Amino acid sequence: MSDADACRLPTRGTGDEAAAIARMLAGRRIAVVGLSDDPYRPSHGVASYLKSAGYEVLPVNPNCKTVLGLPCYPTLADVPGPIDVVDVFRRPEFAADVAREAVAAGAKGIWLQQGVRSREAERVAHGAGLDFVQDRCIKIDHMMRDRG
């Protein structure tokens, strides 16, 4: 799947979703769960874009030592310091567990990438008072914000 396939143009969100998107895009530290070191994977392209846009990208993948020249953490619990957004590149069946880890790590928001939807992850996030977005591409939303 190419970056273009992983990041189609979003539809307009609800007011609450638009506010959550704005708050998360205003954050600076983004933990990317499932970030691949394969430059052909969508996670790699999106994280590379975020890094070039000035975000501090925090790779999270137990199978990698470094990604994009950055140290890779095995879990969210291993990420030092605060996390503004947890950007999730995992299959939907893993999203709720990632949401629980994000809550435990003190993250402010959870963003499930395009194609990833989970009602349970949404319940976990909202139950903890976190911003939550699903089935959207953070790269495209950032690009559209800058055009707007």
Image: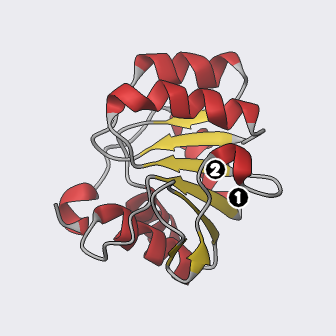
The quarter of the picture where the N terminus appears is bottom left
Question: In percent of the image, x 31 and y 72: which residue is there?
Answer: 38
Q: Mark 1, residues whose alpha carbon is within 10 Å: few (<14), some, or many (≥20)?
A: some
Q: Is residue 82 above or below residue 40?
A: above
Nearer the observer, 36 or 119: 36
Q: Which of the numbered marks, if any, corresponds to residue 137?
A: none
* Cα gap from disc 1 to disc 2, whole angstroms: 7 Å
Question: In percent of the image, x 64 and y 41: which residue is there?
Answer: 109
Q: Which residue is mark 1?
A: 27
Q: Is residue 134 above or below residue 53?
A: above
Query: Helix, strand or loop at disc 2?
Result: strand
Question: In percent of the image, x 25 and y 57: which residue is there?
Answer: 6
Q: Residue furthest right?
A: 81
Q: Which residue is mark 2?
A: 85
Q: Is residue 8 visible?
A: no
The quadrant holding residue 127 is top right
Say which amino acid is labelled 1: Gly
Question: In percent of the image, x 24 and y 73: which residue is there?
Answer: 40
Q: Is residue 69 visible?
A: yes
Say which amino acid is labelled 2: Val
Nearer the observer, 9 or 73: 73
Residue 73 place in picture, x, y as percent? 62, 59
Residue 42 place in picture, x, y as percent? 30, 63
The quadrant holding residue 9 is bottom left
